[in-house]
Image (tube, rainbow, N blue to C red):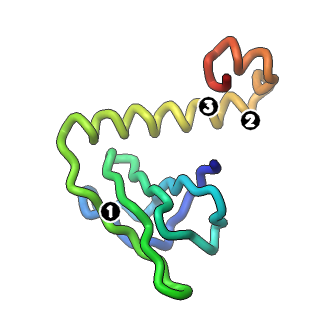
Amino acid sequence: MKILKIDWLGDCNNCGDSDHAVHTDKGSDKWLYDGDKVFCDCGQEGDIECDGDVAWVNWLDLNEDRVKYNKLKIMYDKLKYLIMESNYGDEKYLRNFGAIE
């Protein structure tokens, strides 16, 4: 699974931000697929729905604990990306850090 930074899906229904992280197996920066997961930095979560060549987010109604969990997950994903892009991105370091199994 890869994480894409997408800014063309529209605004988050919670905070109004338009930059979202999309978790996808097959998607790209131009194509997303039904069921891809969307996360906003504020912790809001949604699912991608598609019809032909149009995709949109169905934002979920989340409780406060789920929003807090998502915020932590987003921070973890960003940290993992920074580590992989740094000089510490070797496999041994990442295994010790717990970023990969």
- Badge 2 local density, few (<14 within 10 Å), some, or many (20+)? few
Residue shown at 37% from the left, 38% from the top: 71
80, above or below 57, in the image: above
Residue tagged 1: 12
- Badge 3 local density, few (<14 within 10 Å), some, or many (20+)? some
Query: N-terminal of the two: label 2 or label 1?
Result: 1
Residue shown at 71% from the left, 21% from the top: 94
Q: With 4 as the anchor, is 11 left or right in this view?
A: left
Q: With 59 as the anchor, is 84 left or right in this view?
A: right
**Residue 51 percent across, percent down from the top left:** 47, 84
Residue tagged 2: 85
Q: In terms of secondary structure, where does tag 1 sit?
A: loop
Q: Quadrant of the C terminus?
A: top right
User: 53 or 76: nearer the eye?
Assistant: 53
**Residue 64 percent across, percent down from the top left:** 18, 39
Quarter of the image for residue 100 reads top right
Residue tagged 3: 80
Give the Cα separation between the discs numbered 1 and 3: 24 Å
Q: With 80 as the anchor, is 51 left or right in this view?
A: left
Residue type at numbered disc 1: Cys
Quarter of the image for residue 16 reads bottom left
99, above or below 57, in the image: above
- Number of dots carrying numbers: 3
Q: Farthest residue to the top: give it.
A: 96
User: 61 or 85: nearer the eye?
Assistant: 61
Residue shown at 49% from the left, 69% from the top: 34
Q: In terms of secondary structure, where does tag 2 sit?
A: helix
Residue type at numbered disc 2: Glu
Q: Which mark is residue 100?
A: none
Give the Cα separation between the discs numbered 3 and 2: 9 Å
Residue type at numbered disc 3: Lys
